[in-house]
Image: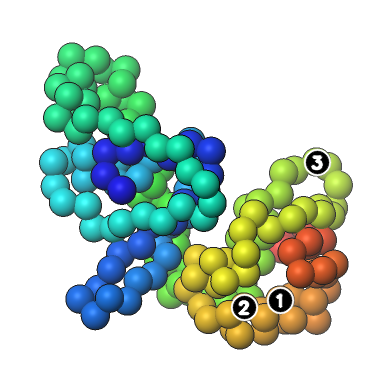
Amino acid sequence: IRDRDVTGVQTCALPISATGQSAVVQIKMPGGFFVLSAVLSAMPALVTARAVGTARLLKIDAARLRQLLATEASVANSLLQATAHDFGAMVQQVCDLKLRTTAQRLGCYLLSLTETTGNDRAAFKLPFDKRLLAARLGCRQENLSRAFAALRQDRKSTRLNSSHITISYAVFC
């Protein structure tokens, strides 16, 4: 997807190799942007995208957007902040892949889905299926199952069923 704003559905960025293999490098929630850095720099996009459900897309003309940025500092500032946020998230993901086990990456990701409520536990539903979650965490599905088992064994989280999680903040903080 190029020059588009994603609304109403989760989507994932997928780089495609010469052999046709792909990997999930980013998952955007509704309202997120894809390939913003490519649009702003007039460079080719390094990823394609796939919607995880029915999607509504808003196509934005890249050349006109770049012209607007030359005259509207507030728009330029907002898009610069969005690009910086995406870059920071990508650096964090690389650090996670290099420095944390799958169970640690899973625990951190689950905590990122929770809201601080003053309670020491949170219960929630996974926002997408486990196949996509495994791809997001950089592991195979069987490794994800082992990571859930490791968290349950450490009493860091308890899977209530196939997609509902209860997690304790205290053991991660």
The answer to whether one can see residue 61 in this image is yes
Q: For mark 2, does the 10 Å Cα neighbourhood hold few (<14), some (14 to 19), or many (20 or more) residues? A: many
Residue 74 x/y as whole percent: 32, 17
Using residue 26 as the reference point, say whether residue 79 is left or right of it.
left
Amino acid type at circle 1 is: Phe
Residue 100 x/y as whole percent: 53, 74
Q: Distance between the residues labelled 1 and 2?
A: 6 Å
* Frontmost residue, 39 versus 61: 61
Q: Which residue is drawn at 83% across and 42% down?
A: 118
Q: How far apart are marks 3 and 2 (CA)?
A: 27 Å
Do tag 1 and tag 2 residues touch (Cβ < 8 Å)?
Answer: yes
Residue 147 x/y as whole percent: 66, 79
The image shows residue 168, relative to residue 54, as above or below, that is: below
Q: For mark 1, does the 10 Å Cα neighbourhood hold few (<14), some (14 to 19), or many (20 or more) residues? A: many
Residue denoted by label 2: 144
Amino acid type at circle 2 is: Leu
- Disc 2 is placed on an element classified as helix
